[in-house]
Amino acid sequence: MTPAAALADEPVRVRVGGLAAGERVVVSAEAEEYSGRSWRSEAIFVADANGTVDVSRDAPVEGSYSGVDPMGLFWSMDPLDGDASYFQPVWPHVRGEFTVRLSATGGEREPATATVRRDWTAGAVSFTELTTKTDGVRGMLVLPPPGVPRRAGVLRFGGSEGGVDGLYDAPLLASRGHPVLCLGYFGVAGLPDSLHDIPLEYFATAAGLLARHAGDEVAVVGYSRGTEAALLLAQLRPELVRAVVVYAPSNVVHSGYPYTGAAAWTMAGRPFPTGPIPVDRIDAPVLAIAGADDQLWDAATHSAELMLALGGPPHRALFYPDAGHGVGTVPYLPSKTVHQGRTGVQTHGGTRAGDAAARQDGWSQVRAFLAAV
């Protein structure tokens, strides 16, 4: 394993030596999530003339993934009980790393084993839980280590799943200098139970709070239904927003979720109307990221129409043909394409390999986009 420890969004190199030329070897990876559930992948490789398998160079002849993919063993793990959609390590603010155990088995030999540590932080990243009573918002403030040059702050929130989203993203961004506020806006104690009548002023309050830690340079990152709030914040309060990233976005305002006919968002105490999101006052560059096979909604078309409304550069969209609604964010974590949502089973579309490729490329582009703010 090279290296034996790395940030969770960085690739590692897996090599097996000491084999006979042409020998078949089974390489597997296994990791345990917060619940104690184990996830596992397995692939069969054929050694080269020097008796070596290099997962960065060689494609498996069969297994849990196909083609040459240095991190295929990591993202293709499946739960051993077959009953989970996402691999969920212990929250980074509780435990700063998780481990992946690899083994190689060939012939009559004892298995060779190695462990790689996947770190969420580099340095003394700090975590502070925010409450509506004390701070006016609910979420987690994640700050870079002392001495790391500060970059733009990142206001991060999710979609119709509710809760506080982005807790895996945040420490990786903070390790590189970005103060991050993972914001909950419903589905968590002290906030509404569902995505109905959420004041858009709430997001402005969060942006203002984060700005105090980020020199007034705040980027907004939203996912799915949260992209509506991200774009509306940039439209209604352009002085607060320096950049926008929208994953699996919408370019229209939908009604509340679950769909009862009530409004999702309010402004000045009044329901914000459904329909195309106005963008004429957005000053910040917008980066849209969409899977072309999104089965929850047509994020690719939404992204294209958003780009047309914005008028081109500096705004841009990334389209991934084999990805679905799971097009983001942190790479190399296993995830299925069918999930249990708040209203039942949801098919997100795409393939696991397509989502994995999109997350790897998209995450690197998002990091570069945010670093340039």
Image: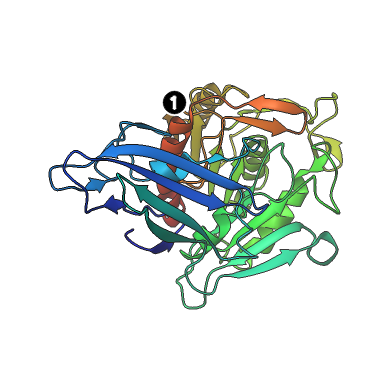
Q: Quadrant of residue 69?
A: top left
Kindly give the residue lying farthest to the bottom in the view shown: 147
Q: Quadrant of residue 126?
A: bottom right
Decide which of 168, 33 is in the foreground and name it.
33
How many callouts does the rendering have? 1
> Where does label 1 land, which residue?
322
Image check: 15 left or right of 295? left
Colour mapping used in the image: rainbow
Callout 1, which amino acid? Asp
- Quarter of the picture holding the N terminus: bottom left
Q: Is residue 209 above or below residue 276?
A: below
x and y, in percent, of residue 344 in the image = 75, 27
Decide which of 359, 155 is in the foreground and name it.
359
Decide which of 229, 42 is in the foreground and name it.
42
For the point 58% across and 48% down, which residue is it?
A: 38
x and y, in percent, of residue 242 in the image = 54, 52
